[in-house]
């Protein structure tokens, strides 16, 4: 049974904030602020404007991904515990109602942090392959957090700054824009203290993280029957440019095949990065049918998730050309 | 700036970053294993050299091979000066 992903829907807030302003508020020194701009390539971070709500972004991304259809299950991958703390405990019910999915089930997944969204995709795939699954069942995967809820939530020292953005994608059987080919995940519990890691633990994490990501992507690629250095595109976790220079050197994937176009102006947005990179690459005409893309996410804790998807000609490009 | 000068500037910068006096350093010293640095602190060290000795960092040339030893870091600094001189 073929499992696939729909085109990705992305919703951004109405404004962006300079990363340097966020770092200054967090008390970062000038060297670190220059490093974020010059070496990491992070300039701006999507930020909800006064009056805008994360719940609205999630609902709009979900509706766009559903594209008039329905889903029997919603999986919401998030990093922060915002659904309980900031969106209110009736958030799942409100969101289901806005999506027209009042009878469907809704689960949040956050324990693998920024790997949650791609883990939701993996769980959606398993759900659709369960014994007795209906052929027409669809799973809506949502992702995104409100980083701007406070600066402590959006700044990871020495690593990245996270913004407010939402993604939606439908996982279903049959023909889709992206055929799910294979996936892999990893966990390293040495770093379970997450944001409370000691300086030594942070240093060790920084040293070994790229090797673990390379290993996970390599396993996913090999499970897909493609050597990792033959993957056409990598849709990365957009934490910073430096990480992906290291990944390129260690994996053999050329830098130009790692889609970092969104790094400067959009940067890191929790678990939604890889799907946003995929959406951007597709919308800008980079992708061709038959090409294989590695979607990659990294969660503090530490967790890694990778999925290999193959671009399928869904006829939408031709329709767009005909329709103008 | 010659190689000896570069290593001397790295010694001073390392002492500042690690808050520890290094009477001398050798090219073979490994940044992560021997000096307990991580990539972030090495980049901050390089940023500090932009201020003190006028090094201009080219982020595109910064790969993991730069972070291996004092020697590879010196190579990176040396090539930065060589580029600036062209």
Image (cartoon, rainbow, N blue to C red):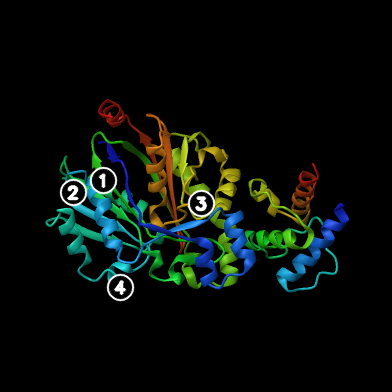
Q: Which residue position is annotated with label 2?
A: A71
Work out whether residue A86 or residue A125 is closer to the camera in this orientation and state it: A86
Secondary structure found at label 2:
loop
Point out residue A201 in the picture as x, y percentages from the top left corner: 56, 68
Q: Which residue position is annotated with label 1?
A: A170
Question: Would residue A234 be found to the left or right of residue B82 on screen?
Answer: left
> Are the residues at dot 3 and dot 2 in contact (C-beta closer than 8 Å)?
no
Q: Which mark is residue A264?
A: 3
The crowd level at tag 4 (other Cα within 10 Å; few <14, some 14-19, many 20+) is few
Q: Relative to residue A208, is residue A219 depicted above or below?
A: above
> Are the residues at dot 2 and dot 4 in contact (C-beta closer than 8 Å)?
no
- Residue extending furthest left? A103
Q: Relative to residue B29, is residue A128 depicted above or below?
A: above
- Chain holding disc 4: A
Work out whether residue A22 or residue B68 is closer to the camera in this orientation and state it: A22
Both marks 3 and 1 on one chain: yes
Give the foreground label among 3 and 2: 3
User: Which callout, 2 or 4, points at the residue further toward the start of the chain?
Assistant: 2
> Are the residues at dot 1 and dot 2 in contact (C-beta closer than 8 Å)?
yes
Point out residue A44 in the picture as x, y percentages from the top left corner: 48, 57
Question: Would residue A276 be found to the left or right of residue A190 on screen?
Answer: left
Residue at mark 1 to residue at mark 2: CA–CA distance: 8 Å
Residue at mark 3 to residue at mark 1: CA–CA distance: 28 Å
Question: Would residue A298 be found to the left or right of residue A256 on screen?
Answer: left
Both marks 3 and 4 on one chain: yes
Point out residue B23 in the picture as x, y percentages from the top left corner: 85, 69
User: Which callout, 3 or 4, points at the residue further toward the start of the chain?
Assistant: 4
Give the foreground label among 3 and 1: 3
> Are the residues at dot 3 and dot 1 in contact (C-beta closer than 8 Å)?
no
Q: Quadrant of the C terminus of chain B?
A: top right
Q: Which residue position is annotated with label 4?
A: A85
The crowd level at tag 1 (other Cα within 10 Å; few <14, some 14-19, many 20+) is many
């Amino acid at each position: 049974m073929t499992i696939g992903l729909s085109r990705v829907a992305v919703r951004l807030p109405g404004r962006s904030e300079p990363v340097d302003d966020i770092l200054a508020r967090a008390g970062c020194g000038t060297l670190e602020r220059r490093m974020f701009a010059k070496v990491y390539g992070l300039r701006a971070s999507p930020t909800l404007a006064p009056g805008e709500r994360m719940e609205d972004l999630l609902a709009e991304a979900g509706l766009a991904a559903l594209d008039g259809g329905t889903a029997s299950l919603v999986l919401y991958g998030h990093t922060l515990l915002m659904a309980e703390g900031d969106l209110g405990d009736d958030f799942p019910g409100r969101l289901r109602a806005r999506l027209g999915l009042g009878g469907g089930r809704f689960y949040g997944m956050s324990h693998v942090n920024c790997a949650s969204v791609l883990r939701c995709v993996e769980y959606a795939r398993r759900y659709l392959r369960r014994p007795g699954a209906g052929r027409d069942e669809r799973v809506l995967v949502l992702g995104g957090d409100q980083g701007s809820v406070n600066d402590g939530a959006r700044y990871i020292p020495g690593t990245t700054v996270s913004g407010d953005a939402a993604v939606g994608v439908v996982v279903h059987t049959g023909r889709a824009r992206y055929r799910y080919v294979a996936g892999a995940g990893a966990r390293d519990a040495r770093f379970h203290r997450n944001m409370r890691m000691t300086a030594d633990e942070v240093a060790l994490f920084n040293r070994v993280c790229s090797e673990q990501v390379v290993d996970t992507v390599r396993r996913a690629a090999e499970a897909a029957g493609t050597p990792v250095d033959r993957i056409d595109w990598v849709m990365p976790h957009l934490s910073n440019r430096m990480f992906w220079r290291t990944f390129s050197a260690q994996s053999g994937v050329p830098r130009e095949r790692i889609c970092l176009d969104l790094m400067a102006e959009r940067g890191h947005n929790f678990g939604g990065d890889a799907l946003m990179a995929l959406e951007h690459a597709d919308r800008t005409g980079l992708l061709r049918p038959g090409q294989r893309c590695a979607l990659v996410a990294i969660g503090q804790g530490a967790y890694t998730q990778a999925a290999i998807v193959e671009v399928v000609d869904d006829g939408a490009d031709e329709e767009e050309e005909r329709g103008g | 700036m010659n190689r000896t000068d570069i290593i001397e500037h790295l010694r001073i910068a390392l002492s500042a970053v690690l808050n520890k006096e290094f009477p001398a350093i050798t090219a073979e010293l490994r940044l992560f294993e021997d000096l307990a640095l991580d990539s972030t602190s090495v980049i901050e060290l390089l940023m500090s050299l932009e201020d003190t000795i006028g090094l201009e960092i080219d982020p595109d040339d910064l790969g993991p091979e730069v972070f291996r030893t004092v020697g590879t870091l010196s190579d990176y600094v040396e090539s930065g000066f060589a580029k600036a001189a062209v």
